[in-house]
Amino acid sequence: MSVWIRKYLPKSSKEIQGQNQAVEKLKNYIQNYKKGQKALLIHGGQGVGKTSSVYALANELDYEIIEVNASDLRNADSINQRLGAGIFQKSLFGKIKLILVDEIDGLAGREDRGGVGAIAALINKSCFPIVLTANNPWNKKLSSLRKKCELLEYKTLAYTSILIYLKGICEKEGIKFDEAALSELSRSAGGDMRAAINDLQTLSYKKELKKEDVALAYGRNHTEKITNALVRVFKTTNAEVALPAFDEVQEDLDEIFLWMDENIPKEYTKIDDLAKAFSNLALADVFKGRIRKWQYYRFYVYCYELLSVGIALSKDEKYSGFTNYKPTTRILKMWMAKQKNAKKKQIAEKIAAKTHTSQRIVMQKTLPYIKEIFRNNKKEAEKITHEMEFEKDEIEWLTK
């Protein structure tokens, strides 16, 4: 019996569900690639179509695809040997090549020293488009690689997109299905198309899918995804439905707080509902602080009740429509602020070395004047640039 996730891989861009804009950008990148151009880094959760869309477009455009999995490449030598061969050699079939480096965040371990730098160096030399995929592109060990890439986000799939695809599979496989059962399976996948197809193949071995089969499968040894838990909280006004929402999620309490903080404003659009929800979130944070300060672990109960029932009942009625819940952007903002501050320190170090001044004094008293000069006096800025040996990115920072 064939594995359905392979059997039903999309063969063209039209078959890819829920990522129309992203796929169009990917297609434009591949078709218009020029030597020396940045690579394209596709990022998003598991099963949203990152790798499959690359294969679908390669098939559609008649490109030869060269795939390497970053988790199999342990160091710079292995990367140069395997990836370098694909980048510098012409296709044996006379086709244009498309280089795919899958799961690039798998290179973040200590044993992969030099791996990220080796890939970054090869990007500048490639004659063919290079596409990388990652679940989390913001790992600091990938920072040098991000500078060589354009980022393209693949959003979490709506359950309706998954449902449409599963219906197509059922028709082709001759499976009788209960509409409610297929909908529940699609929701329970948490935006992961690959997981949904695997579950469908497992549960429909009798060529039939019933609601009780889905309920049994997801009620036993099933770890809830955080997005499913958010749906249970945000889309109900029933305390009994909301209370167990976080019982089976893998995320710890701090991560749940971040998810709630990010997504409450997306779901609750009425001012009163928003105020009540954040009030309950704040109160839960108070109890979390008491747990850390005094080790009152019984307060965990209050935290989870406020995060589930408290926030669920903050609204008078549930909001209709689909909301695409996303992880927090706070960590990304902190990273961006850190990068900005790092550039400031880098410039201050150069000025301090040339002027025999402390870095602290330069940052407090000298830099504000230097920035004004770069904004308003081009000739003086050129002199300072020559004297301080500023790089292009440092000049850009000073002129912003």
Image (cartoon, rainbow, N blue to C red):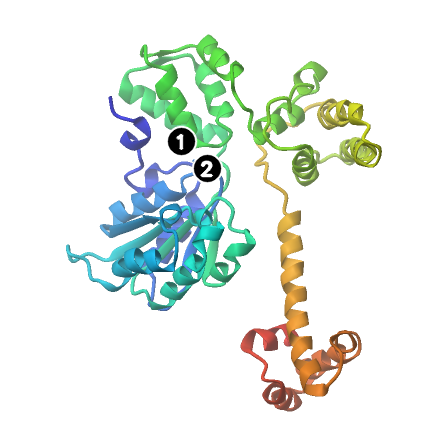
Quote the CA–CA distance across marks 1 and 2.
Answer: 8 Å
Q: How many marks?
A: 2
Q: Residue 366 at what x, y percent from top left?
A: 76, 80
Q: Give the image location of residue 314, x and y in percent.
A: 76, 27
Residue beneath the point at 40% across and 62% down = 118
Q: Between 29 and 107, which is closer to the camera in this rendering?
A: 107
Residue 120 horizontal/vertical position (percent): 42, 62
Disc 2 residue crowd, few under 14, some 14–19, many 20+, Cα 10 Å:
some
For residue 19, say whether it is visible. yes
Q: Above or below — where is 326 with respect to 382?
A: above
327 to the left or right of 270: left
Residue holding disc 1:
194
At 56% from the left and 78% from the top, the residue drawn is: 391
In the displayed structure image, the side of residue 263 where residue 177 appears, left or right: left
Amino acid bearing label 2: Gln
| Residue located at (47% from left, 60% from top) | 145
67 and 193: which is toward the camera = 67
Q: Which residue is mark 2?
A: 46
Which structural element holds mark 2?
A: loop
Q: Position of residue 129 (x, y in %)?
A: 33, 59
Asked whether disc 1 touches disc 2, contact meaning CB atoms under 8 Å apart, the reply is: yes
The N terminus: image quadrant: top left
Looking at the image, residue 220 lies above or below residue 342: above
